[in-house]
Image (cartoon, grey):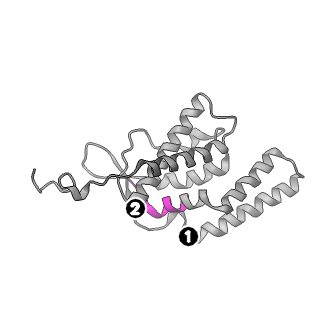
Amino acid sequence: MSSELPGLVGKERITAYDGTEYYNMLHSIQEILQKHAIGGTLGKEQSKYISLSLFLTDLIYALKTDSAMLVVLPIPKVEDYYGIISPHILSAVGNLLPGVTPIEVLTPIPQLSVKASEVAIFEELLGSQIFSAYSNAHSSLENNRESDVAVLDNVSLKAKSVWQRFSNTGGFNSDSQHQRL
């Protein structure tokens, strides 16, 4: 083979990864989405959960392994998940997805990029104790076990904590480097 094809020839461009980390990550993301399901995960909703779970897992895994991601299905649209996933999860996903942008490259497969920092912030947000507390506050609002004023105050307090923690990270609109997918 010719050395004129960088990336296609040579063992240094081929890296094998253990699938265990990927599947653990997929399981974690599926658990988060299913925990915040509205009305269960059966039928059509289940395929939407799986599609979003796979997309988010692929995106985070590509960032962690500094590798490309092949996307054959359309990029998920937040609107498709209204009424299926809790709004606070959709808010986090909705802040991430607009950062996935097309790359103008002449290849047989369309290419996209996303800022690596946006994916890292998204992953940190979902795994944070602050976001978990915010999510639990929303669950209290839905279950309405306490007085409405106390529950709303708690949700507002937790939302403020999330905002304070993640607004100074550069947010989802930072000018950091894009990760090619």
Q: Is residue 126 above or below residue 144?
A: below
Residue stretch in magenta: 113-122
Residue at 37 percent across and 59 percent down: it is 66
Residue 35, image x, y percentages? 66, 44
Residue at 55 percent across and 45 percent down: it is 27
Residue 34, image x, y percentages? 63, 42
Q: What secondary structure is marked by label 1?
A: loop
Q: Amino acid at mark 2?
A: His
Residue at 67 percent across and 64 percent down: it is 162
Mark number, residue 30: none
Q: Residues within 10 Å of mark 2 (few under 14, many from 20)?
A: some
Give the alpha-carbon distance from disc 1 to disc 2, as whole Å.
Answer: 16 Å
Mark number, residue 178: 2
**Magenta part, dominant SS:** helix
Outermost residue to the top? 43
Q: Amino acid at mark 1?
A: Thr
The answer to whether any part of residue 76 appears in the image is: no
Outermost residue to the right? 147
Q: Is residue 77 left or right of residue 132?
A: left
Residue 165, image x, y percentages? 64, 69
Check residue 120 for magenta coloring.
yes
The answer to whether any part of residue 52 appears in the image is: yes
Q: To which residue does mark 1 refer?
A: 169
Q: Earlier in the sequence, mark 1 or mark 2?
A: 1
Check residue 23 for magenta coloring.
no
